[in-house]
Each structure stands twice: as structure tokens, then as C-alpha cells.
Image (cartoon, rainbow, N blue to C red):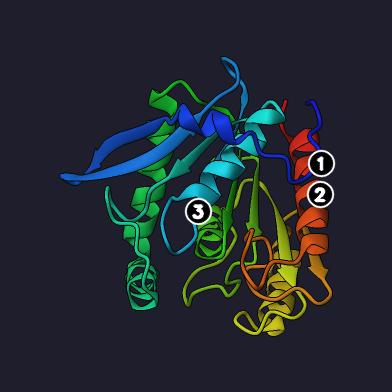
Amino acid sequence: MKKIFFGTVIAASLAFANDITYTVDGKQYEGYYKSPAKDAPLVFMVHDWDGINDYEKKRVQMLNDLGYAAFAVDLYGKGNRPTEFKDKKANAVALYKDREKMRKLLYAGLDEAKKQGANTNNAVGTGYCFGGSSILEFARSGADLKAFVPFHGNLFTPKGQDYKQTKGKVVVFHGSADKVVPFKEFADLATELEATGINHEMLTYSGAPHAFTVFGSDRYRKDADMKSWNRFTQVLDETLK
């Protein structure tokens, strides 16, 4: 895949928005899909707790610039893009409490990506914060993806779940200064993945707080963002055809 200078985002291309409306259990959802070429390898992305916004679309474009297709799945519903803390928390917590619904929406999004022409047989999953937690849920469900890559997500395994059905490798990016996700979760996940025999890679970044990849926020850490993104693109190159 061709390389991109980190941080370069072709903003003008965002004008060619590919918002995809689909229905799950009678409710409309709106994903975002862009592909640079037919049958391009796919990155299946789960949004942060504020829904699909310009952040996810920028990441989609960065992946397109590297030659990958990307589909951002919507777990909240069309038009539901919370901006207030309480609303973001309410939406995320509702799905944390209903894991079966979360899984159903993830699979529905992957099915919709396939309908749009995405190469779901050659795909990796990723997500940011809430999305990182969700992509691990997808891994535990047995989703047929080649890798699952959470950025600064919650890492604990819910009671009654495990990684015995996980089909792809797991690569975790975590900030050592994250006060939202205890480091014990990171260590416990590494121990669990090792015991289960899951191919995994666990990376931490010093001085990086929770949400260290979010451009423009006071938690953004360029060094950790660059390093994690560069390793992520290496994983894509190593994993996808």
C-alpha cells in the first residue's frame, strides 16, 4: 500500500460524502463508506461515543489514501450524534448493557458494507474509545475478520464472555497515562489472550491519556498518535492481501 505523511488529510475529498442509510429492526442507521478501488482491502471501523463525525471521516480518508476501503458502522441510529456529555454517556452505556444488541448492530453494519461492494472477506476491524471496546466485543463474538485493533478502548472482558471464538489477531493501543481505563485491564487482557492462545500484540505509550488520538483535543498526544497509527498501518500491510 502507498504511504501517507502522518497527519495529512485531504479535506476536500470529504465533500464526496458516502453516507449509507440502512435499517435494523425497523430503525434507520447511517454508516459512512469510501473505497479507493474495487475489491480494496477493508477496514471496518466503529465510532467513538459521540457517533460518526468528522473524526471518523478523516480516519476513513487517511485509510483511503493508503489504498484501503473503510466502512464506519453506526451503532446509534441515523441523526443521533450526541454532543453533550450526558447524552454521549447514555448512548454508550445503553449498548454496554445490551451486548446482544451491540453485536447485532455490528453484524448488520458488516452486512451493509458487503452490500455496498466492500470486500468483507479481506477485512480488519478497528475502533476508537467506545469503538475500541465495541470491536473487542465483535472479536469475542467470533466475527470473521483478520484482526481486531482497538485504540484506547475499555479492555475488560464482561462476565460470561471470553475470546475462545475469536478468529483474528488482537492488537491493542493504550496510553500508560489513561485514567479512564485502568492499566490492570490492559494486563488482564494480555493474560487472557495468552491463556486462550490468541495471537496478540499489546502496545502502550508513555504520557498518553485516554483518547490520545483525538485531533485538536487537550488529550491529543502527537507522538503516541503517530506511533500507534504507523504500527496500525503496518498491521494492515501484514494482514490484508
Please tell me whether mark 1 sits on a helix, a strand or a loop.
helix
Say above or below: 39 vs 235. Answer: above
Asked if one can make out residue 126 in the rendered structure from this viewpoint, the answer is yes
Expressed as whole percent of the image width and height from the top left, the position of residue 83 reads 37, 66
* Comparing labels 3 and 1, the label whose residue is closer to the camera: 1
Per the image, the residue denoted by label 3 is 138
Residue drawn at x 62%, y 61% as measured from the top left: 214
> Which of pointers 3 and 1 lies earlier in the amino acid sequence?
3
Q: Amino acid at mark 3?
A: Phe
Separation of marks 1 and 2 at Cα, in angstroms: 5 Å
Q: Is residue 27 left or right of residue 190?
A: left
Residue drawn at x 60%, y 16% as measured from the top left: 37
Q: Quadrant of the N terminus?
A: top right
Q: Is residue 139 left or right of residue 178?
A: left
Q: Callout 2: 10 Å neighbours few (<14), some, many (20+)? A: some
Label ID, residue 234:
1
Please tell me whether mark 3 sits on a helix, a strand or a loop.
helix
Q: Callout 3: 10 Å neighbours few (<14), some, many (20+)? A: many
Expressed as whole percent of the image width and height from the top left, the position of residue 228 reads 78, 55
Q: Quadrant of the C terminus?
A: top right
In-front residue for pair 191/79: 79
Per the image, the residue denoted by label 2 is 231
